[in-house]
Amino acid sequence: MAEKILVVADVKGGKLRKSSFEVTAQASRIAAGLSSEVTALVIGKGMEGAAGELAGYGAAEVLVAGGDVFDSYSSGAYTRAVLEACKQVSPKVIFLPASALGRDIASAVAAGLGAGMASDCTACEVKDGKIELVRPIYAGKAYITFTLDADVQVITLRPNVFAPGEPDVSRSVDVTSLEVGPDEKDQRAKVVEIIKGASEKPDLTEADIIVSGGRGMKGPEHWPVIEALADALDAVLGASRAVVDSGWRPHSEQVGQTGKTVSPGLYVAVGISGAIQHLAGMRTSRCIVAINKDPEAPIFKIADYGIVGDLFDVVPVLTEAVKGLEE
């Protein structure tokens, strides 16, 4: 019987997040190299129908934990669901996205299993029968390639790095309920309210294009300058820590070591000098464009394309050029 790999899917608003498909697809590639099979775990009420979508990305079976205990998010309850799934499946490897969910429960799952753990990995492949991993260290200034010396491994994968590819719509999968009852320990902390933002655009961690502004924007009143560029590119807005600390933009838009780690296909840094803290959160972007009037700004050292100039002159011209491409 083939050994199992368990994938923990991420759910938001009753839908599977993009990172769920990315992790499932990558797990299936690893499973092929290890002659294993992928079992996916979906946690959340009413997810039985949507859970079957993971079959197209390589899941051989799907477990759904959908009891009343999952009416709202609880790290304790979600951790117990993963550990219950592990009892049933006995996986050698557990993959989670390095999203808010994965960052919250992965270490607890590893501790509960006595497993080795690797977090926020940006590359993952099978070599000589072992899973070789790559992750950033020293605030993203270097990368380490390694393997885990552990019988059971818990691995989180950075969102927007591993392409899920096109799903195989011909595949189907059995969806099985996983019973996870209530536990008083889960009530130590619970979500009591979710305040949704007005934007319908994807979360920063899942965005394909991000336009971020920094201190060079000079104030919140100038934000429409990059909002226009973001709209033209169908991009999501981001911000540096200096901007958020100044109260110009909400913390939900902060990119960096103390904000969100992003890996879009295109990252446009406007008026951002490139402090280490910020670079740690976006340097894995596939294409980086920097606009700054200081030619010595650190952001230019990692940028694929750089424009030295006053952003208030450059960005409007760039925005009009983008709009012209759509006509």
Image (cartoon, rainbow, N blue to C red):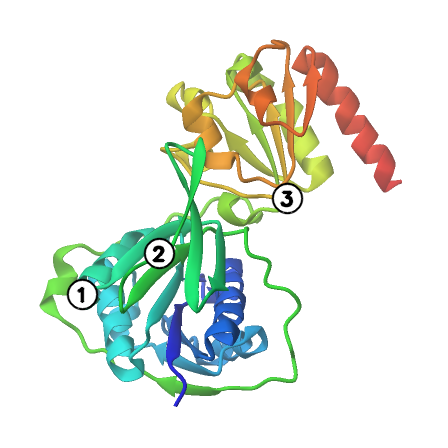
Crowding at dot 3, Cα within 10 Å, few <14 / some 14-19 / many 20+, comes out as some
**From the viewer's perspective, is the residue at label 1 or at label 2 nearer?**
1
Mark 1 or 2, nearer chain start: 2
Q: Amino acid at mark 1?
A: Gly
Residue closest to the eye, 34 or 295: 34
- Total numbered circles: 3
Q: Amino acid at mark 2?
A: Gly
Residue 167 can be seen, yes or no = yes
Q: Which residue is drawn at the image coordinates 27% and 69% (left, top)?
A: 151
Q: Which mark is residue 102?
A: 2
* Horizontal arrangement in the rendering, residue 273 relative to residue 291 (left or right): left
Q: Which residue is mark 1?
A: 112
Crowding at dot 1, Cα within 10 Å, few <14 / some 14-19 / many 20+, comes out as few
Asked if the residues shown at circle 1 and circle 2 are in contact, with their CB atoms under 8 angstroms apart, the answer is no
Q: CA distance from mark 3 to mark 2?
A: 22 Å
**Image quarter of residue 191:** bottom left
Crowding at dot 2, Cα within 10 Å, few <14 / some 14-19 / many 20+, comes out as many
Asked if the residues shown at circle 3 and circle 2 are in contact, with their CB atoms under 8 angstroms apart, the answer is no
In this view, the residue farthest toward the front is 128
Q: Which residue is mark 3?
A: 265
Question: Does residue 35 lie above or below 159 as drawn?
Answer: below
Q: Amino acid at mark 3?
A: Gly
Image coordinates for residue 137, horizontal then vertical, percent: 38, 37
Q: Secondary structure at mark 1?
A: helix
Image coordinates for residue 253, horizontal then vertical, percent: 47, 35
* Horizontal arrangement in the rendering, residue 70 relative to residue 95 (left or right): left
